[in-house]
Image: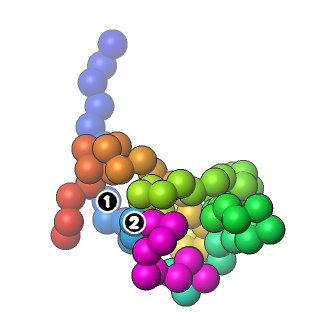
Amino acid sequence: MAKFRRKPTEVEAFQWFQNGTENPRNAVKHALIDLGTAAFCVTTIHGQKTIVVDGDWIITEPDGEHYYPCKPDIFEAIYEPV
């Protein structure tokens, strides 16, 4: 088995908190927000509706139109501030 390293890449992301000051409608231009269930959801590049929970990071896909959530511990292990 061979080893591989992730190519260096920069992403746009923000950490979402349900009671935070960031308004998801402003932060994520094309996110799907299901306020009927009081859940904040994003639609991934694969068309999946994914619930974002308190503290998740929301990462913008390279196409700039889709997003995906990432748990804080995984985000910190993979990404560092630029």
Residue type of the residue flagged with mark 1: Thr
Question: Is 20 covered by the magenta stretch?
Answer: yes
Q: Quadrant of the C terminus?
A: bottom left
Q: Secondary structure at mark 1?
A: loop
User: Which residue is located at x 20 percent, y 66 percent?
Assistant: 81
Q: Main secondary structure of the magenta part?
A: loop
Residue 39 figure quarter: bottom right
Q: Residues within 10 Å of mark 1 (few under 14, many from 20)?
A: few
Question: How far from the left and from the top, in percent, is residue 41?
Answer: 65, 62
Residue type of the residue flagged with mark 2: Gln
Which residue is the site of mark 2? 15
User: Which residue is located at x 30 percent, y 19 percent?
Assistant: 2
Q: Secondary structure at mark 2?
A: strand
Colouring of the image: rainbow
Q: Quadrant of the N terminus?
A: top left
Q: Which residues are magenta?
A: 16-25
Is any atom of residue 8 visible in this view? yes
Question: How far from the left and from the top, in percent, is residue 13?
Answer: 40, 68
Circle on res. 9:
1
- From this viewpoint, which residue is outermost toward the right? 36
